[in-house]
């Protein structure tokens, strides 16, 4: 199935009501909702030759791996996230449950299971730490409290400016009381047991910062997200884009690959189109950037426009998230034959997460602070049909961008011996972490390849190879300007940077942007249907938006 029309070969035909820059989860979600609920013709521009951003799959002959989707929570029928997935994919995306244990934490010789279901999670933790019952109960109360407060917090991001100034603080304040505290601060206020703190914060790789640096809000959101269990897309993570793109096309839209955007075009201070890398200009009355805040304000929007709207200092208040490396492994036996399970395994170095994290950032020869083991070929019931007799494994680890920065201007496979040696050393550490947990895999690796932060920089256009967009520090959640509607007329943001980390965060960010454009609540957007499953056309709520026939043309 060909998802995107190749720009270099076919160019762009037709006129469009909106242009979305980037085909990641946020961009595709916004485009799908604008198509289904606003009947807008949306043009999605993707600089990569694959559609999907971190949801696309990486292939080599006989094998495939996901590059960013390892598990998703809240996918049971009726869950809000599942309803949103069903809407943007027209109900075509299916999910395979991962079972009663979604994550296993390994710290030294000790193992801890994270079990699906609030009571199961609680009882299992108390079984491991019987003297910490009160701390565990209070911890779970705070996690649920964050979940209750998140609605008003994000609702404020959709208010008109005058309402945000008058009532916004009352909507944001309850959540900010916890968001301003680090994960470590909150956990240390509950218990003085360092091992309990280590276990409860062991999923910090899901948002990229160790306990002393991360906001407790993002920690609580990740914990709550998986509390009911986790699932994996049937057919692999590529099925996400494969089921969304037809929805965009059904309303007259298009997704175009190999279509790099050089900058956004402005006239009289308003975003009116994009200039492609080859100099061609594509115009539309609505521009949505899913390229991330750093790229959007760092290279797509002229500095003069940022100064005009007082944005220059604001963007210095946030920083990029961590970067990572992924080791992709292929085996010539099935997951069942190899004894691979569905659960993810977090292998942590003994001791304090913050100390281990800092030591590794400063010294590449130090032990890995953690290695994340994911077995997509075991999670996906359709994998053996696509790749009979094969299995794949991903190992993910922290990889500070500064280690790779000296080679950022070199080309793939031409970076030199020192670069290859750095990758080889990192690969060896990641392999050993896998073999310690899965000794049956030793000697059976048929294919391996390591992606570095430079891969993320190249394919996703993230300047520092960041995995999660903006770093989820307490300061990040103080930034009121991180909202879908920018101060710049005609320009909106979408994706994780206006929401939170991960596939679910980017999905919700995309929905927030569509809601801001269409000028209706998300609940209303998802409730109203028109003939044939598509919703009647709604005029977007964009200031002085031109009519479709005015000012829109192909290059």
Image (cartoon, rainbow, N blue to C red):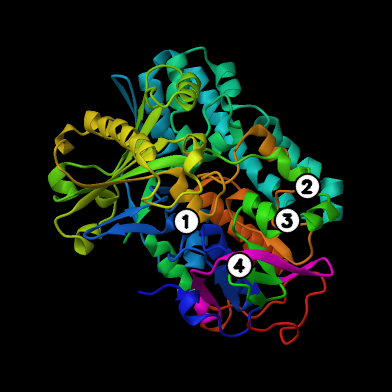
* CA neighbours of label 4 inside 10 A, class few (<14), some (14 to 19), many (20+): many
The residue at which mark 4 appears reads as: 20
Evaluate whether residue 526 shows in this view.
Answer: no
Element under disc 3: loop
Question: For residue 363, which quarter of the picture?
Answer: top left
Precedes in sequence: disc 1 or disc 4: 4
* CA neighbours of label 2 inside 10 A, class few (<14), some (14 to 19), many (20+): some
Measuring from the top left, give residue 177's x and y in whole percent.
70, 31
Q: Is residue 73 above or below residue 270?
A: above
Precedes in sequence: disc 2 or disc 1: 2
Element under disc 2: loop
| Foreground pick, 209 / 450 | 450
Query: Separation of disc 2 and disc 1 at Cα?
Result: 26 Å
Q: Is residue 106 above or below residue 551?
A: above
Element under disc 4: strand
Residue contact at pointers 3 and 2, CB within 8 angstroms:
no
Disc 1 or disc 4, which is closer to the eye? 1
| Foreground pick, 513 / 51 | 51
The residue at which mark 3 appears reads as: 158
Which labelled disc corresponds to residue 312?
A: 2
Image quarter hosting the N terminus:
bottom left
Q: Residue at x 70, y 35 (%)?
A: 176
Query: Separation of disc 1 and disc 4 at Cα?
Result: 17 Å
Q: Residue at x 72, y 63 (%)?
A: 491
Q: Which residues fall within the magenta stretch?
A: 248-272
Disc 3 or disc 2, which is closer to the eye? 2
Precedes in sequence: disc 3 or disc 2: 3
Q: Is residue 268 left or right of residue 476?
A: right
Question: For residue 93, which quarter of the picture?
Answer: bottom left
């Amino acid at each position: 199935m060909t998802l995107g029309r190749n720009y270099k070969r076919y160019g762009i035909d037709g006129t469009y009501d909106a242009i979305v820059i980037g085909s990641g989860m946020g961009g595709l979600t916004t485009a799908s909702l604008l198509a289904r609920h606003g009947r807008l013709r949306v043009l999605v521009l993707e600089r990569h030759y694959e559609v999907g951003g971190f949801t696309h799959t990486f292939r080599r002959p006989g094998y495939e791996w996901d590059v960013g989707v390892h598990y998703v929570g809240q996918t049971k029928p009726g869950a809000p996230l599942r309803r949103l997935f069903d809407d943007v994919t027209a109900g075509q995306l299916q999910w395979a449950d991962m079972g009663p244990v979604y994550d296993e934490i390994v710290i030294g010789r000790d193992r801890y299971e994270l079990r699906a279901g609030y009571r199961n999670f609680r009882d299992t933790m108390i079984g491991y730490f019987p003297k910490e019952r009160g701390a565990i109960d209070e911890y779970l109360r705070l996690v649920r409290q964050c979940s209750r407060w998140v609605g008003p917090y994000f609702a404020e991001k959709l208010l008109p400016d005058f309402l945000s100034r008058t009532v916004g603080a009352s909507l944001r304040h309850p959540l900010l009381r916890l968001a301003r505290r680090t994960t470590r601060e909150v956990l240390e206020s509950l218990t003085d047991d360092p091992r309990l703190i280590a276990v409860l914060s062991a999923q910090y790789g899901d948002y990229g910062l160790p306990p002393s640096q991360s906001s407790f809000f993002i920690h609580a959101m990740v914990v709550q997200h998986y509390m009911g269990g986790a699932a994996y897309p049937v057919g692999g993570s590529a099925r996400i884009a494969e089921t969304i793109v037809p929805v965009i096309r059904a309303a007259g839209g298009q997704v175009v690959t190999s279509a790099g955007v050089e900058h956004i075009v402005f006239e009289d201070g308003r975003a009116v189109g994009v200039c492609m890398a080859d100099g061609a200009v594509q115009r539309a009355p609505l521009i949505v950037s899913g390229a991330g805040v750093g790229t959007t304000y760092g290279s797509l929007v002229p500095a003069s426009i940022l100064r005009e709207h007082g944005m220059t200092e604001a963007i210095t208040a946030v920083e990029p998230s961590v970067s990572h490396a992924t080791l992709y492994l292929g085996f010539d036996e099935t997951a069942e034959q190899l004894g691979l399970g569905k659960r993810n395994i977090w292998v942590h170095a003994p001791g304090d997460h913050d100390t281990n994290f800092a030591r590794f950032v400063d010294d590449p020869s130090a032990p890995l602070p953690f290695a994340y083991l994911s077995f997509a070929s075991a999670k996906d019931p359709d994998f053996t049909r696509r790749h009979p007799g094969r299995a794949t494994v991903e190992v993910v680890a922290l990889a500070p961008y500064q280690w790779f920065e000296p080679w950022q201007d070199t080309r793939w496979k031409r970076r030199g011996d020192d670069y290859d040696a750095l990758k080889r050393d990192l690969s060896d550490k990641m392999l050993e972490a896998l073999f310690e947990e899965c000794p049956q895999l030793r000697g059976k690796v048929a294919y391996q390849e390591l992606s570095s932060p430079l891969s993320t920089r190249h394919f996703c256009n993230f300047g520092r190879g960041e995995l999660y967009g903006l770093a989820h520090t307490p300061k990040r959640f103080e930034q009121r300007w991180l909202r879908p509607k920018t101060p710049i007329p005609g320009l909106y943001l979408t994706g994780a940077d206006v929401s939170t980390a991960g596939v679910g965060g980017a999905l919700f960010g995309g929905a927030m942007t569509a809601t801001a454009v269409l000028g209706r609540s998300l609940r209303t957007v998802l409730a109203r249907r028109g003939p044939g499953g598509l919703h009647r056309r709604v005029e977007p709520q964009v200031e002085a938006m031109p009519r479709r026939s005015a000012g829109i043309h192909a290059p």
